[in-house]
Image: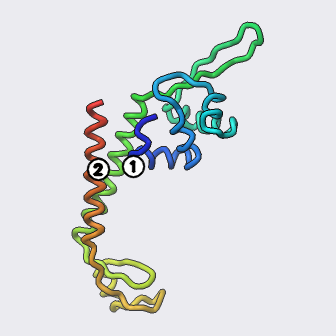
Amino acid sequence: MLEPENLVVREYFSKLLGKEGLRILETVPDDEEITDEEIARLSETKLTTVRRMLYTLYENRIAEYRTERDDESGWITYLWRFNRENIKKIMRAEAEELLKDLESQLEEEREGVFYQCNCQRVLFEEAAAREFWCDKCGSDFEFVENSGVIKELREEVEEIEKWMQEIKRK
């Protein structure tokens, strides 16, 4: 489908479809019509699970279908395909939201001084107001170095910004 190894894509589709739906989606060939039966066969999944996933994608304007009627039997076949442009729009919006959240977290980590006890991590102001003692777990609040957290957040922000640039180019 669309870059299932990408953090933003995986997170979005995992939220939307769950882990099983994400696994099913990874088996769908790009840019061609496919029946729900074929998807079930390729992913070795129950047809009802595949149909549930397809309808979820349809409701979110990611999947589209057309029908064909067999003149002899009267059976209707649903041929599914995925709207890559809508996926790009949705992914861009999802990435922007995730980026905004990560940048907010990064700013909080850069500006804050954190203390931690056995059960929670709090800002200096809260630790000081509690006299550096946690009444929930009964332990002292101790200073926590957060440069590792800042580095991880910065790397995630850079990864998402890079991915957003790639999406714009496609």
Marks 2/1 in contact by CB < 8 Å: the verdict is yes
Q: Residue at x 60, y 32 (%)?
A: 39
Vertical order, 75 against 115 (above or below): above
The residue under label 2 is 159
Q: Calculate the distance from the C-alpha at mark 2 to the C-alpha at mark 1.
A: 9 Å
Report the front residue among 6 and 143: 6
Q: Residue at x 26, y 44 (%)?
A: 162
Q: Residue at x 50, y 29 (%)?
A: 29
Report x, y in % for residue 32.
50, 22
Local crowd at mark 1 within 10 Å, few (<14), some, or many (≥20)? some
The secondary structure type at the circle numbered 1 is: helix
Amino acid at circle 1: Leu
Amino acid at circle 2: Glu
The secondary structure type at the circle numbered 2 is: helix
Q: Is residue 55 visible?
A: no
Q: Is residue 42 visible?
A: yes
The residue under label 1 is 7
Question: Residue reaching furthest top?
Answer: 71
Report x, y in % for residue 112.
25, 73
